[in-house]
Image (cartoon, rainbow, N blue to C red):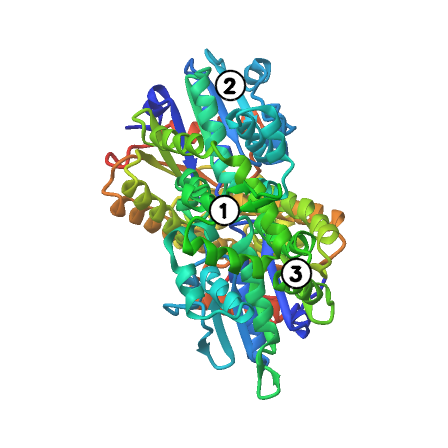
Amino acid sequence: MARDFTSLLRRQVLLVTGKGGVGKSTVAAGFALASSRSGSRTLFVELDRDTSLEAIFGTHGIGHTPRRIHEGLWATKVDPQEALVEFIRDNVPAGPLVRLALSRRVMGRFWKATPSASEMVSLIRLHLLAEELDGGRRRWDNLVVDLPSSGHALNMLEVPRTATVLFKVGPVREKGEAIRDLMSNRLRTAMVWVTLPEEMPINETLEFFPRFASKLDVGLDHVVINGVHPDVLDATERDAFARLRGAVEPGARDLWNLVSCVEGLVARGARDRQQIERLRKALEAHFLEIPQLHARGPELVSIVADFLEGREESRRFA
Amino acid sequence: MSLSSLVDTSRLIVCCGSGGVGKTTTAAAIALEGARRGRRVLVLTIDPARRLANSLGVEELTNVERIVDPGSLRDAGVDAAGELHALMLDPKATFDDLIRRLARDEARAQVILGNRVYHLLSSALAGTLEYTAVEKLYDLHRRSIFDLIVLDTPPTKNALDFLDAPGKLSGFLDDRVLRWFMPEEDTDGRLRYRIVQRTGRMVWSILGRVFGDSFLEELGTFFASLNGMTGAFRLRAEEIDKLLRDEGTAFVIVTSGDPAIVDDALFFYRKLREHRMFFGGFVVNRLSPDTEPIDHERLVCDVEGLPGDLGRGPEMENLVRKMEHGYTVLRRASDGERKTIERLRRSTGMTGFLARVPLFSHDIFDIPGLVLVGSHLFGEGALLAREA
């Protein structure tokens, strides 16, 4: 088992996805923090419009323009509307008239509903950020990208390929090819999957992992298993616990209650272990486990970063 | 109104909330209770866990409702006076059906179904799942086969995705946009696109430069074939909207005790109010089990009182210390959840029910599991918020 996932940060772009509700954005933020801790100029890129960055970073008003969170760490939430205007501005020599046309209400509704338009311009924006130069070198050492949840992420990442099929010429085709090149470049881009040790998220992992591999040419072989209920007892303690459980009488109320409470915890830990075993048997990948943590916001992100760096292996009941 | 009365009186119960909070299981358990109470119930699920789907008998995406074998209900101790049916949504098939229904004739439908823009729209468009879910719902509702439909909505953090789904699609099919793309025949017989307004002309030229002309032609064909259907689309969107606001419709918000998930639930609650849709109540899933208070001194006595010398020695001492630590952690978690639930109560002015379901030590994937969930939803744990 890999104890340190920061090797993933050797690539410039790290894409993070997983089923909704598994803590994907927090894990992504943990990667971004770990990256900035190592001295890399890091940008956290939010592509999932449903995610509240305020809750994660404790910073208000993170928008389309990268905003500094602290030393070495910036964050941006890509706004498809702005990305579109930006794209048209860079690719269609028109100027104010274009802005006027695009700002019309009907046009706005059209773009919003046009299949895959916002996905495409969001990826174009991501590509732009990855290529951005600052004084002759790349502006961002690391881009940690919080993708939408699995199904939406797959759709989104397929859009550039669809675009190259659909568009024979023109800037959209060129961008589509450039994005595909960036995604499939194993030296520049890596992907990590986040799951919980539970039935549904593990099923979705087993279902989507091969689909990402076959439909997208992207390097995906790392899985973060989040929210693991730790084993409360080790092997010798389990023996002693079995003896205790056999001997305790309901009359000894406090001990009786404690034993039934720990029994529940043991059962939960065992259930998680079973699911993790199922995943490991079915999937050839590197795994890293993060226990269930009772922290929130920046504090939680910081602990998650510790785990990703392999510094918190012994932290169990935090 | 309690969840039991909702099950008795509603024609539609919509279960909504973030992903991963047990929405599908909750919807299925509510539907099962409806069947138990003698109603003809359909649970419309989206992407259920495979084992749950299996036990409901809907392992394939047939897009057609199937009755759940009454034998398997009886085996689980459910003496259903009514019927439980289940359906797993197939978004693409639902969309195709809709096109066939609204198209003037089969030939026109075929043109649309084969169009590449349509393929993108019906499979890749974010929101397609939401739209097809309400579309299928509307279709089933109109057929009036069921007394009660329980809808398991797609997982989304953004409530608007679901509530606005019908409007979003008809926005895309806005006549004013469509007009830009209406083809007309040129004198030399080639299709050209009529540009009625100056804006349209300019937009067209921008789109041409961005996407290339071949895509535009495809887009034009797509819009042209939809010509005449947009009114029907809009009408349908309006009717779906009416159904969601109908007095026989109730929304149940499913959440967990996690503070961030509860924030989403409250957001959804406010949106329901804004949209003037009927809020039935909250189901809070995956709660830490209630723990009895444990006193350290009495615990030490209990350990000393164990038969023989079992309670003595460093091994047992160590174990008990560790168990106490585990207990403290659990206690802290359940205290946190209690506060979170309190916040739900306060923020909602205590309208609607609040049902609490614990985190089970095994996954729920069969009828007996649904019965277990139901015992918490409809049993003593499911108090009205104002009573608790």
User: Would you say residue B116 is visible in this rendering?
Assistant: yes
Q: Amino acid at mark 1?
A: Arg
Query: Are the residues flagged by discs 1 and 3 from a single subunit?
Result: no
Q: Chain of mark 2?
A: B
Report x, y in % for residue A234: 64, 55
Q: Given this view, does label 1 or label 3 mark the residue nearer the observer? A: 1
Q: Secondary structure at mark 2?
A: strand
Q: Are marks 1 and 2 in contact (CB under 8 Å)?
A: no
Q: Which residue is mark 1?
A: B194
Q: Which residue is mark 3?
A: A173
Q: Chain of mark 3?
A: A
Distance from Cα at disc 1 to Cα at disc 2: 53 Å
> Compared to B360, does B379 lie above or below?
above
The answer to which of A18 and B161 lies nearer the viewer is B161
Q: Quadrant of the N terminus of chain A?
A: bottom right
Q: Which residue is mark 2?
A: B84
The answer to which of B309 and B332 lies nearer the viewer is B332
Residue farthest to the top?
B81
Graded by Cα atoms within 10 Å as few (under 14), some (14 to 19) or many (20 or more), the crowding at tag 3 reads many
Residue farthest to the front?
B187
> Compared to A95, does B341 lie above or below?
above
Q: Chain of mark 1?
A: B
